[in-house]
Image: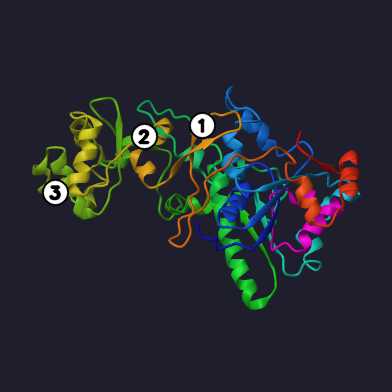
Amino acid sequence: MNQGPLSGIKVVELSVYVAAPVCARMLADMGAEVIKIEAPMGDGWRGAGIGYLPRFNKDENPIFDIYNSGKKHVSLNLKTPEGMEAFLKLLEDADVFVTNLRSSALKRLGLSYEDLKEKYPSLIYAAVLGFGKKGPDADMPAYDTTAFWPRSGFLRDMATITEDGSYAPVTAPSSVGDTATGYLLMGEICAALYRRTVTGTGDFVTSTLFHNGVFCMGTMIIMTQEPFGREYPSKRIDHGFTGSFECADGEWIYFPSGMPKDFPEFLTMIGHPELIDDPRFVPAKHWENRKELHKYFREGILKQPHDYWVRYGREHGLPIAHMAHFRDVSKDPQAWENGYLERVEFRNGNVDVMPASPIEMESFTPPPTKPAPAVGADTVEILSSLGYTDEEIKGMIASGAAIVSE
């Protein structure tokens, strides 16, 4: 395995749950040494992961491990002078500090950017924010299920209005907005590290759940402004010949509008080549005649099973996809062929299929996912590396300033 592009970079992570841990895991995947600092009880996401399914436990916690693989896990009580002293020693030669603690909590601990920027001028201070630095909601508690999905309009307006006019808002998927936010923060950190090679100075970079939600929903946010007038939620027929369609076997397929040149091929596909020259269905008339267009496609696609349509799309270069269930992805040959999935063995001997690191570089292959160790598993090693003696470490453990795994 080639040396990672971030080999030699030291990252100190003080974060919980998903967004910032995703960022730090990506940095670790690229070769950085990531030291995750957990409170005495550990990151709350450990317990959340165990709570997802009866099978999950402290020895098999893939929901936690996917975001925390490849890190060294240290547990310090930062409310004690000794714990805070050790933490600040870690920052002395750190390149990056990653956090998603609320601004008020960081300020109380003396760990805000303003508190640290003069003391550690070359440090890249990277923070996940909920709603931004300013405004009435700046210090509100935030999750992707509150800041990314609902505030951006997705949950309400991505619902489909039924024939009787009713609809139910979409339920937010777990951790997706967090992951997108962590990805952006990772990119900003890499840019800041490059800038530091030129200027020698650190930076303050942030990635905000609400902002990322707004940008990700940019197309819809633009179209629904008053000058443009697109309305959401919408009825299924409003999407005409694009979108989801049920097939003869009860499975569903999806295809976007594609390029205008694809439309005649789609009409041929459903058995209506005579409509290619129909003036009702020239591109400029699609919206006006969307109900009729939808009817033709719905009835045509119901005549064949989903694999027929997927095969047709592959043979004719049309963007047609089977609408998979989450459970289908772990068996997708395309995902396995490209290394998007991997089998991970846990401490209890169970082997689970997990998504692999998304880092893709010609010059480097990221390491395989490994289960994260217990709370404080690397506390002694890291404290020793900071110059603490065995007796000092024992004293910190005895006082509760440092925690080791049992």
The answer to whether residue 145 is seen in the rendering is no
Crowd class of label 2 (few under 14; some 14 to 19; many from 20; radius 10 Å): few
Q: Nearer the viewer, residue 183 or 108?
A: 183
Instruction: Determine whether the residue tagged by mark 1 lies in a helix, strand or loop.
Output: strand
Q: Is residue 103 inside the magenta stretch?
A: yes
Q: Is residue 178 inside the magenta stretch?
A: no
Mark 2 / mark 3, whichever is N-terminal: 3
The answer to whether residue 261 is seen in the rendering is yes
Q: Nearer the viewer, residue 196 or 269?
A: 196
Magenta highlight range: 84-106
The residue pinned by badge 1 equals 351
Mark 3 / mark 1, whichever is N-terminal: 3
Q: Is residue 174 above or below residue 3?
A: above
The quarter of the image holding the C terminus is top right
Amino acid type at image mark 1: Val
Amino acid type at image mark 2: Ala
Q: Residue at x 60, y 52 (%)?
A: 23
